[in-house]
Amino acid sequence: MKKQFYNIPEQPDDPVPLNPWFCRRQDFFVKNVFREFFKSYRGFTVIYEQYPDCGQITFADIEQLVGAESNKGLWLLKNQCHQLWRHGGLQPGRENSFFLDWLIGSLFHEAMKLKENIYIISRYVPIAHEIDDLPGREEVTGNPAEWQRFLSSARREIPKQVENLAFLFGRAAYFLRRELINQGENMLLLRYFFENPDMLKELWSESLEEIFTDLFPAGPEYGYCLVGKSYLDGHWHEQALAAYSAALKLNKKCDDALRRISQLRVILRNNAEMMLSVS
């Protein structure tokens, strides 16, 4: 009998069909999810590392992390995950995408609660001090101790919410890494990784070579060749040369890389000569 790790009730299929336009551009939106998660992860890491020293989080920092409906941040990330992975609920073979959607949604809502508490502290604590100096303040505001209990409750919640966000970011990063096994043909994502290798180190402490080794049984050079071909098909010749050169560095006998590098050097030399002739 197969062991169940999570006792979550079976959910009905989402009655809303996937948008055909969205489906045709799914690789693009998956790439955006990884990109926006990394930006949010990096932004939260700065907040998390500074918080123990300064003991506070500015409203501007948490507002940037949360984002808005017309802005980026966790708001956009949450919406994109819903579009990609909310359909169908928890089904065999879809566990990873289900938990990703759940975790990213939870990240957004936990960050919103933190934002609200930080707003309360930054906006109303100074006003509470002013109220203390009002003559006859109890007649105006009621029992001052009740106001202080409310503000103290918001203060106590902030450290817990920061730790909750740290946990959720860590789990979401783990499930994103698991999702990579389904993205070996997503050239937009692989190209993004090629252009941003530091992201892989920060999120998973892995190099692009290690990621490609995991994704491609033929060897990591195969991944670099796929990236090179994608660039070449889009006439991004310099980027294609860099990708094929990375493949050749790993495998000096890689026929595809050897052939394409020779071809690209001719193309780039001809392009340079053409530019000189018209200048």
Image: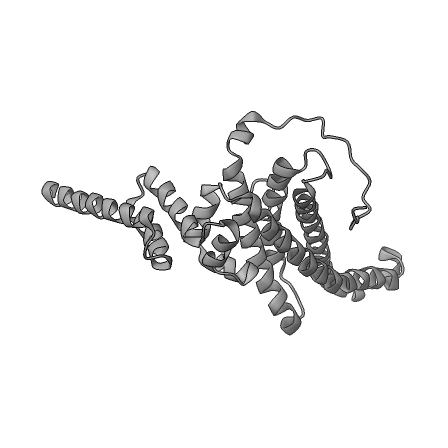
What's the residue at 63%, 43% (across, down)?
78
Residue 131 in view: no
Estimate the x, y position of residue 63 in percent, counting from the top left. Answer: 61, 53
Front one among 235 and 32: 235
Front one among 39 and 6: 6
In the image, is residue 154 above or below residue 189? below
Lateral position of residue 129 relative to residue 188, left or right: right
Residue 187 in view: yes
Estimate the x, y position of residue 220 in percent, counting from the top left. Answer: 44, 54
Lateral position of residue 224 relative to residue 275, left or right: right
In the image, is residue 150 above or below residue 271? below
Estimate the x, y position of residue 15 in percent, counting from the top left. Answer: 71, 26
Front one among 101 and 279: 101
Q: Residue furthest bottom?
A: 53
What's the residue at 13%, 45% (across, down)?
273
What's the residue at 44%, 55% (across, down)?
196
Q: Total marks drawn? A: 0
In the image, is residue 243 above or below residue 156? above
Question: Looking at the rendering, in which quadrant would you find the C terminus?
Answer: top left
Estimate the x, y position of residue 121 in percent, counting from the top left. Answer: 72, 60
What's the residue at 60%, 59% (across, down)?
44
**Coloring basis for residues:** one colour
